[in-house]
Image (cartoon, rainbow, N blue to C red):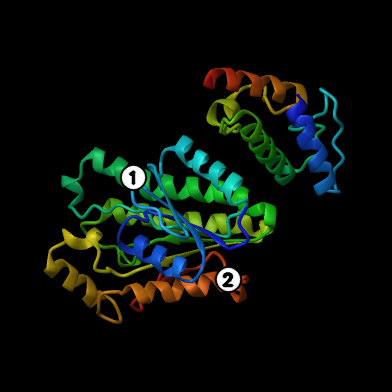
Amino acid sequence: MNVIYDVIDDFNEEYSDYHLEKTPNTILFGPGRQLDSLGFVNLIVAVEERLCDETGQSLTLADEKAMSRQNSPFRTIATLSEYIQSRLEEQS
Amino acid sequence: MSSQNVMLITGSRKGIGRRLVEYYTGKGWQVVGCSRKSAEDFKGYRHICLDVSDEKAVKDLFAMIRKEYGRLDVLVNNAGVASMNHSLLTSMETVQKVLNTNVVGTFLFCREAAKLMKKHKTGRIVNFSTVAVPLKLQGEAIYASSKAAVVSLTQVLAGEFAEYGITVNAIGPTPVKTDLINAVPDEKIADLLKQQIIGRLGTFDDIINVMDFFLNPASGFITGQVIYLGGVSG
């Protein structure tokens, strides 16, 4: 979760159009989201990059499995965090 | 971190890719190159062995560029394989190999390069297509199809990456005397040249001229374009 919060700090600073709150229930994707589609792309790319820096693992988060799930793992910060955890465990 | 301009060239061990490495390192660029087989590093040049369609290897390469150079100014998607054969004699193995290198590889490198370039809100991507696309050359069904896909990628990605200040263009060379056409019979090459407005083989200088045009700082308004050599029209 801390990785995502760090990215959100940078993100809010870089993109003044957004102010994403650092809470587990903040909606990132789907109904009620603050981000437009490009903002979402930028956020996910920034999370991938931060993960690579901190874990040394290169993940592509938006892969086929993630996109075809009925409940999107990108829905909230909490679901994204769980998803990242599971992907990191898969890879290790 | 590099204060010099950084360029990544795929398929840089031999042929046009090698000549591009020599030309741009000679101009003071920091060049990173890659190919399946190894090649010597030298001043201004670093070589990485990888298969351009191996997603993990490609992501690791970009992670290295980000950490060690801190930037990427230009990507040249030069790596390519050809298959000159009648479609009835083309194996699935050949089909996969050509599509993996020419389409999957080009896509992966464009995607990862854009992630790195967008930080600096500038970047140039040059892809390699071929005159075999507009000439619809018989005997090159898979090769021409894969390079037609490169044209589509170029045009779509130009739109997607424009807001990041990244231009995406392609060059469509005529045959150039490299390993890629060594196995093609002379009469086939002669037939092809007859279909060009200017009926000769391309040279490295012809390619460099277009490359330099796309990379020129004044070409920031040029994107989604394909320039075919020899007077061939798209």
- Quadrant containing the C terminus of chain B is bottom left
Q: Could you tell me if residue B232 is visible in this image?
A: no
In this rendering, position of residue B178 left or right of residue A29? left
Residue A54, quarter of picture: top right
Q: What is the spatial separation of the Cα atoms under label 1 and label 2, in whole angstroms?
A: 32 Å
The structure residue drawn at horizontal position 54% and vertical position 64%, both measured from the top left corner, is: B224
Q: Is residue B130 above or below residue B97?
A: below
Pointer 1 and pointer 2 on the same chain? yes
The structure residue drawn at horizontal position 34% and vertical position 72%, both measured from the top left corner, is: B204
Q: Earlier in the sequence, mark 1 or mark 2?
A: 1
Question: What percent of the width, then of the height, locates residue A86?
Answer: 61, 18
Q: Is residue B229 above or below residue A15?
A: below
Which residue is labeled 2 in the image?
A: B222
Residue lying furthest bottom: B198
Label 1: which secondary element:
loop
Mark 2, chain letter?
B
Q: Nearer the viewer, residue B187 or B4?
A: B4
Q: Is residue B63 above or below residue A25?
A: below
Q: Would you say the residues marked 1 and 2 are in contact, meaning their CB atoms lie under 8 Å apart?
A: no
Question: What percent of the width, then of the height, locates residue B24?
Answer: 46, 67
The structure residue drawn at horizontal position 65% and vertical position 20%, both measured from the top left corner, is: A85
Q: Nearer the viewer, residue B139 or B187?
A: B187
Q: Which mark is residue B66?
A: none
Question: What percent of the width, then of the height, locates residue A22?
Answer: 85, 29
Which residue is labeled 1 in the image?
A: B36
Q: What amino acid is at disc 1?
A: Arg
